[in-house]
Amino acid sequence: MIPFHGVYTRGQFFRGIRLALRPSRRALVLRGLGALIAFGVIGAYIVVAVSGEGIPTSRLIRTGITALFLLYWAVSPFVASWWAASRQWRKAGGQLSLRGVATDEGVISNALASEAVDRWENFLRAHMRADMVVLVGADGLATILPRTFFADEGAWSSFCQMVDFKVAPPR
């Protein structure tokens, strides 16, 4: 059993939510391309407007709406993660904490009302960083465990090894 406990800082909590809601690499590339195309279209229309050439109003509106939808699609995961983190942070009044233990069966914490075991097989992926592990469950909930929540370096490294062995890495 590896015990953990602590109070989140705003930075830890927001970073954990961002990691949990982060799109896959492929989705990030596609969204980046979408944003570039949207900005390119908007920039092209600005250049045409500044040069004095006329653009039919229906074409301008149709293309503008398409570019705005494409831009919205590209940035929506990032806005959603910030919104979700802000809502939780405000709801808790900035005092979010977590206490529990990691066992061979899974993670037991005070995040669940019944303090039931979140089994390792119920976690879809783990985002492991040098100072934080974020476990994303099949139910869409994330368990954010910063390094500072563990008593010492031995407990942290044991936990990281357990997560590495028990949870599939994100694709």
Image: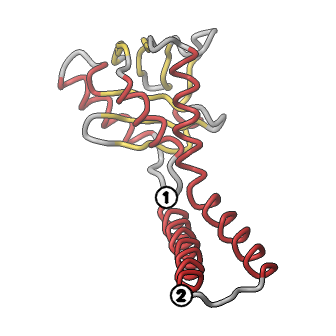
Q: Nearer the viewer, residue 114 or 121?
A: 114
Separation of disc 2 and disc 1 at Cα?
A: 46 Å
Residue plotted at (64% across, 60% down): 73
Residue plotted at (65% across, 70% down): 67
Would residue 39 appear left or right of 56 to someone viewing this image?
Answer: left
Q: Nearer the viewer, residue 52 or 148?
A: 52
Q: In the rendering, at what x and y percent does residue 96 appear?
A: 46, 14
Residue plotted at (40% across, 36% down): 15
Residue topped by disc 2: 51
Which of discs 2 and 1 lies nearer the camera? The answer is 2
Residue at the farthest bottom position? 53
Residue at the farthest left position? 153
Q: Nearer the viewer, residue 37 or 10?
A: 37
- Residue 171 numbered tag: 1
Residue plotted at (47% across, 52% down): 170
Please say if 6 is above or below 41: above
Q: In the rendering, at what x and y percent does residue 141 appear?
A: 59, 31
Precedes in sequence: disc 2 or disc 1:
2
